[in-house]
Image (cartoon, grey):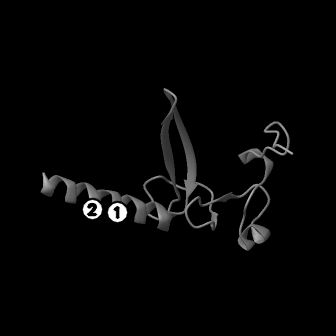
């Protein structure tokens, strides 16, 4: 019996994976895409404790896609500092 690709096909829209922290998040609260914690409402953008946002960029089949995701302040800072450090390493290497 062969497999029919039209049946039992799954896509990203068919299921969602979450951590236990989602059970305790207020309804409609944004979750950090890196660590999954609840992201507080956007405060003043100059406040170092303000949440951030990340952007995924990918190209597939000639189509460029951008996806903006929420990040908590700690993850936004860590990702930003890591990116700057890697950039500096690349600049030193040539």
User: What secondary structure is found at the residue carrying circle 2?
Assistant: helix
Nearest the eye: 4 or 72? 4
Return the mark for residue 85.
2
Indicate the quadrant where residue 71 lies: bottom right
Q: Which mark is residue 19?
A: none
Residue at the extreme front:
1
Observer-nearest of 31 and 86: 86
**Residue 77 vs residue 17: left or right?**
left
Q: For the point 79% across and 69% down, which residue is it?
A: 23
The residue lying at 74 percent from left, 67 percent from top is 22
Where 63 falls versus 91 (above or below)?
Answer: above
Query: Which residue appears farthest toward the top when viewing the image?
Result: 62
Q: Are marks 2 and 1 in contact (CB under 8 Å)?
A: yes
State the CA–CA distance, disc 2 to disc 1: 5 Å
Is 11 on the left or on the right of 4, as rendered? Answer: left
Q: Position of residue 84 (x, y in %)?
A: 29, 57
Residue 11: image x %, image y %? Answer: 74, 44
From what the image shows, is residue 6 above or below residue 31? above
Task: State left or right for residue 4 relative to residue 45.
Answer: right
Q: Which residue is mark 1?
A: 82
- The quadrant the N terminus occupies is top right
* Location of residue 32 by image quarter: bottom right
Q: Residue at x 55, y 44 (%)?
A: 68
Percent x, y for residue 87?
A: 25, 54
* Circle 1 SS class: helix
* Disc 1 packing (10 Å; few <14; some 14–19; many ≥20): few
Residue visible at 20% across and 60% down? 89
Front-most of 87 and 27? 87
Count of numbered labels shown in the rendering: 2
Q: Is residue 5 left or right of residue 82?
A: right
Above or below residue 19? Residue 70 is above
Q: Residues within 10 Å of mark 2 (few under 14, many from 20)?
A: few
């Amino acid at each position: 019996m062969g497999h029919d690709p039209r049946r039992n096909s799954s896509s990203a829209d068919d299921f969602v994976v979450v951590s236990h922290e989602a059970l305790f998040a207020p309804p409609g609260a944004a979750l950090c895409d890196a660590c999954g914690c609840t992201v507080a409402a956007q405060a003043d953008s100059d406040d170092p404790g303000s949440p951030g946002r990340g952007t995924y960029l990918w190209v597939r089949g000639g189509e460029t896609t951008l996806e903006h995701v929420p990040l908590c302040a700690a993850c936004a800072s860590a990702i930003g500092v890591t990116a700057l450090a890697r950039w500096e390493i690349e600049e030193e290497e040539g």
